Image: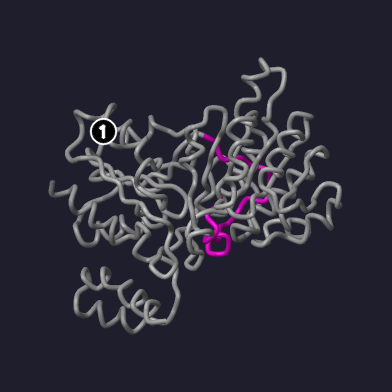
Amino acid sequence: MMLGKLSARLRHTGKKLLLSCGEISAYSATHQCHVREAHFTYFPCKKPREIVGETQKLNMYQAINHGLSIALENDPRSVVFGEDVAFGGVFRCTMDLKKRFGADRVFNTPLCEQGIAGFGIGLANAGISAIAEIQFADYIFPAFDQLVNEAAKMRYRSGNMFDCGKLTIRAPCGAVGHGGLYHSQSPEAYFAHTPGLKIVVPRGATHAKGLLLSCIDEPDPCIIFEPKVLYRTAVDEVPMGHYKIEIGKAEIVRSGDAVTLVGWGTQVHVLLEVADLVQKKLGASCEVIDLVSILPWDAELVCKSVKKTGRVIIAHEAPMTNGFGAEIAATVQAECFLYLEAPVQRVTGWDSPFPHVFEPFYLPDKWRCFAAVRDVLVY
């Protein structure tokens, strides 16, 4: 209890350091130490210009549910399976799908991630669209061998006689405020080292549905890591028809000319807050990029932005050592060296297990990111 109170009080220390006296009074009046709050403010996704038609306000788990419904409707040889998905799943993403499409197409599996992935590989090789849910990304590791050594290599190994292109793995990932070390990890970098896989991370409801439908249609096996804190926090005007978000294409969500900020998933919203803070406090504009796709990733767009701004900060929740930010940093160093005005910076989780009560200190929140921007601007 004492640690919890200490954590709650220290969580706001960085905020107060940057606020004026008047702002501190207003802040204290609206923030209670005993209230658990998200470490970011959600910025709704805009509907892609090329998508027309009716929209509906949905949160992210509802958008995923709608995307799964479309996939099951459009392809009678598609199935959804995983732990507890028949009754809706722990995050409710598969609500009512069993009732609508039947127990032969939406069904529970044993608590065996290796078995879930292996079963999906077999289905995909037989031409069935296998949409599997790993209940938490933290528990995807028993399936690592199946995904890395079997699914990713099947086409190459068989000389294109077989493939797992019809396999899609969904996995809730990332910080949620109270998940601790076994329900908060971001394992995208482990899989990014594997040719043959596609890996995406949505930042909101609109992207979650569009990326899911892209992954299902993609001719290679895909993993979609869904930031679980966004399931109910992320609310967008989501197109109701079938649409896709391109895999491998990053998005500039805010234009700027002083610093390039690169993130994915929840971290995009943190960086948008940072951009607002930098504009207000330092009078500089940040260009915020949502990487969207981890494998493949859009090096061309990122490097073009860095050549314009001369500075780049990469932020992600996973630990720093060998996090995917290291790959981005190495590419920027090689391609943009003569354009850089400051060293490439990474703001990440620490090289430790993901803590419970000290989660606020672990996360690369807007105050840590703001400090990095301030440092590169005066380098």
**Position of 119 compared to 227: left or right?**
right
Q: Measuring 47% from the left and 38% from the top, which residue is drawn there? A: 294
Picture residue at 42% right of the left edge, 50% below the top: 318
Asked whether residue 241 is drawn in magenta, I would say: yes
State left or right for residue 194 relative to residue 300.
right
Q: Which residues are magenta?
A: 226-247
Q: Residue furthest left?
A: 378
Q: Quadrant of residue 221?
A: top right
Rendering coords of residue 152 (x, y %) = 60, 29
Residue located beneath label 1 in the image: 307
**24 to 105, vertically: above or below:** below
Q: Return the residue nearer the eye: 287 or 354.
A: 354
Q: Position of residue 72 (x, y in %)?
A: 77, 45
Instruction: State how the image is colored.
Output: one colour
* Foreground pick, 351 / 379: 351
Could you classify mark 1 by the number of other residues whose Cα lies within 10 Å: few (under 14), some (14-19), or many (20 or more)?
Answer: many
Q: Secondary structure at mark 1?
A: helix
Up-down relation of residue 81 to residue 282 (above or below): above
Q: Quadrant of residue 279?
A: bottom left
* Residue 4 image position (x, y, % from top left): 40, 77
In the picture shown, does residue 328 fall above or below 284? above
Q: In screen coordinates, is 186 left or right of 273?
A: right
Q: How many marks?
A: 1
Image quadrant containing the N terminus:
bottom left
Query: Which amino acid type is marked by label 1?
Result: Lys
**Residue sitting at x 20%, y 40%:** 343
Magenta-drawn stretch contains 322: no
Q: Residue 355: image x %, image y %?
A: 42, 63
